[in-house]
Image (tube, rainbow, N blue to C red):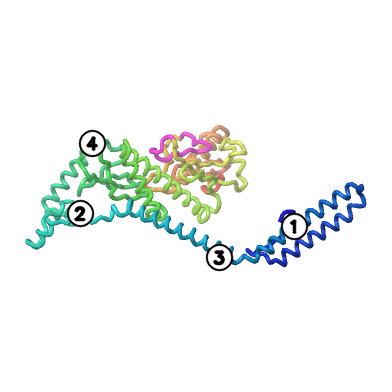
Amino acid sequence: LEGGLEMSVNRECVPLTSLLDSLLQKAYHDLTVLAELLPRKADVERKVEIVQFARQTRLLLVRLLALVKWTGDSNSVQECAEMSALLSQQSWMYSDTADQLAHLSRNLLPQACMPNFSLTPALDVLSLGQYLRLPLCIRSRTTPSPALAAQERLNTLCLMECAIRRRLLSEGVPSSMCVSSVCNGQVTLRVPYEFEISLSVVSTDWSVPWRLIAMKVLVSDALADKPVLIHSLQHQYLHQLVQSRLFGDSPLLGTYECLHSFCLGLQLDCLNMQAIRLNSHVCGGYVKVEEYVPGEKMRVSYWSPSGSSQFLTSFLLNQSKGSIWPKVTISIDPSSPSQPFTITHSPSLPPLPTPLAVSISPSELSVECLVVECVRVRAWALLGRLRAALNGSYWEHRAVLVECPLHLQVSVPLKYSACVLVIGVDGRVGNVVL
């Protein structure tokens, strides 16, 4: 109703009593407000307000009266509304059925037509009892090809080996790799103590890449005397990576660089584990891994500070107090990953008249041997400087350096006899001992 009649009704039909009650409450509320406001207004304004209230209330009552009279015929109106809704629903169903039939006739029925009867196969089957006109592609896909004879297999393998040799001569094998064998239609390439791969070809066309048949990692731990194990997922990923390198412009060189870089990282990890075991079980903390970056470098320090001869050792090494303890760094050159390990010493090793091997051999992957050689060279340098210092004093030409075992003999003259002072170097901590 006009006038702002507000009702919150959750049903479709409103009871007439509720509507009448709401209208009376609204009229009473407006009358109460009017009674409170009229004393404050002038006489003319009062009359205007009273007339407006009477007019608005009369309109509401007239509309209510019309609504009451209309309810007498509400059943007929409801029946007409239901009939109209039913007719609308039937019209929608007729339109939807027509649309579905049109879609069926235009899109689905043309594809559902029956094919023409195949009379020729029927006649062959009925007259001959078999059908001989099947396409050859069906036979090639469903029927396995006959196996090659022994001589044909030998000829095929011989042709494959000739193609492999031609490709090896054309592409060139990296100098670090050696051809182990060419047999059974495949070539075996090997880098000692690193890896071994078997390659083959599927065509004489040189544009067809190599196929990786098998791969074996030959990195072994010298202390454990067994090959270093890698996870099956790593082996599978490495197999896929090497096969992708074989699709490149320089397949053999790319394969070598990929596998060599992986083997160097594996060897570095093996050396790191050896150094940790050496520190905890053998050297008692005198050999420490100061820095380890997987796949890049490892820094090991030895001769940790211990004993009262620290000043003497630092004097003989001629180093500052901040870095008197020697270190050896094993690293992989990022600019040249195909090269072996790069070994640097801090401080650098002194030149010696007798050549001493301070390196890591892939055949004997042992960080213990490296530390032992470094200790031997450092001890030689310490005793050499000490000999030079003694020979330049009162005991000239009396200090003799003995190689095996490595020590320094100093002849000390006494009044009635002479004695020999033996000076050595403790290999664990680098202390000069008598």
Relative to 207, 5 lies left or right: right
Residue designated by label 2: 141
Alpha carbons under labels 3 and 4: distance apart: 100 Å
Residue designated by label 1: 60
Helix, strand or loop: magenta stretch: loop
The stretch in magenta equals 335-351
Q: Residues within 10 Å of mark 2 (few under 14, many from 20)?
A: few
Alpha carbons under labels 1 and 2: distance apart: 90 Å
- Give the mark, 1 or 2, whose residue is nearer the N terminus: 1
Kind of residue at disc 3: Glu
Kind of residue at disc 1: Leu
Which residue appears at 55% of the width and 65% of the height? 79
Quadrant placement of the N terminus: bottom right
Q: Determine which of the numbered discs, if any, sits on residue 79 in the image.
A: 3
Alpha carbons under labels 1 and 4: distance apart: 110 Å
**Foreground pick, 353 / 252:** 252
Which numbered disc, 3 or 4, marks the residue closer to the eye? 3
Alpha carbons under labels 4 and 2: distance apart: 38 Å
Q: How crowded is mark 3: few (under 14 residues within 10 Å), some or many (20 or more)?
A: few
- Give the mark, 4 or 2, whose residue is nearer the N terminus: 2
